[in-house]
Amino acid sequence: MIRLFSKPLRLSAFQRRSIKAVLHFGILTYISTLFTLAVQDKLGADPVKALLHDTGIASLLLLLVSLSISPAAKWIPCADLMKFRRLLGLYAFFMSVTHIATYIAFELQFDLLVVIEDIIKRPYITVGLCAFLILFALAATSPHRVKRRMGATWQTLHNGVYVALILALLHFSWSVKTVLQDPLIYWLAGIILLSYRGYERLKRRRIRRQYKR
């Protein structure tokens, strides 16, 4: 891989804390502003639809950004970037929770029978729920103490984030009934990240085979 800088970059503890503070502030400000505008009826003719779209897009975007941390850390190179991956992944899950809560509370008015019916009859809802359940499992096992207890199983489980990404992209495409326009951009980003992941796995296998010889 061609690197942006010949020498690795390091971030000080102050810089890492500052970046995390900016991420917290930016994401929380975005979501609070979004719901404030909805309450004030400033999100257009259908505020619930706008909330569903914007929270869904935010979750997908944060998921893509979190998955881009690893290749970015190698490309720059700056290993300290990896310290932000967990935070971004948890915010992607938080946005997905907000997305689902908006759907159940405002779209379906807490009618659980309709929720179950939608999950069964609407494929894009089923796919979206599967993506959410994977993100839930990843968020629940994200603490460092859980990672230590799970051992190698932890990495196997967390590789499921790429399955969640594909399901989230399918959910988005089906919900807007097209893969063109906006979905196409996210699909291209997802394909690039999945291709990078596949390339890294093949490279590691090749190295292991050479080592065994």
Image (cartoon, helix red, strand yellow):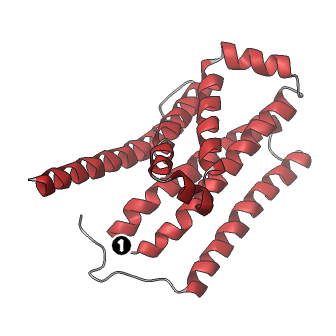
Where does the image place residue 115, in percent across and percent down from the top left? 78, 22
**Residue situated in front as seen by the camera: 46 or 202:** 202
Q: Residue at x 65, y 25 (%)?
A: 125
Q: Can the viewer see residue 36? A: yes
According to the picture, the residue beneath numbered tag 1 turns out to be: 76
Q: Is residue 88 above or below residue 42?
A: below
Q: How many marks?
A: 1
Residue 84 falls in image quadrant: bottom right
Where residue 206 appears, x then y in whole percent?
17, 50
Question: To which quarter of the image does residue 107 belong?
Answer: top right
Residue 187 place in picture, x, y as percent: 44, 39
Number of other residues with Cα within 10 Å of mark 1, as a class: few under 14, some 14 to 19, many 20 or more? some
As shown in the figure, which amino acid type bears the numbered disc 1? Answer: Ile
Q: Residue furthest left?
A: 213
Using the image as rendered, state which of residue 16 and residue 183 is in the foreground. 16
Q: Residue at x 59, y 27 (%)?
A: 127
| Dot 1: element | loop
1 lies left or right of 63: left
Residue at the spot x=52%, y=26% of the render? 178
Q: Residue at x 47, y 75 (%)?
A: 80
**Which of the image's four quarters has the N terminus?**
bottom left
- Say whether residue 54 is visible: no
Quadrant for residue 41, please give it: top right
Residue 175 locus on image (x, y percent)? 62, 27
Task: Say if 159 sits above or below 124 in the image.
Answer: below
106 to 113, vertically: above or below: below
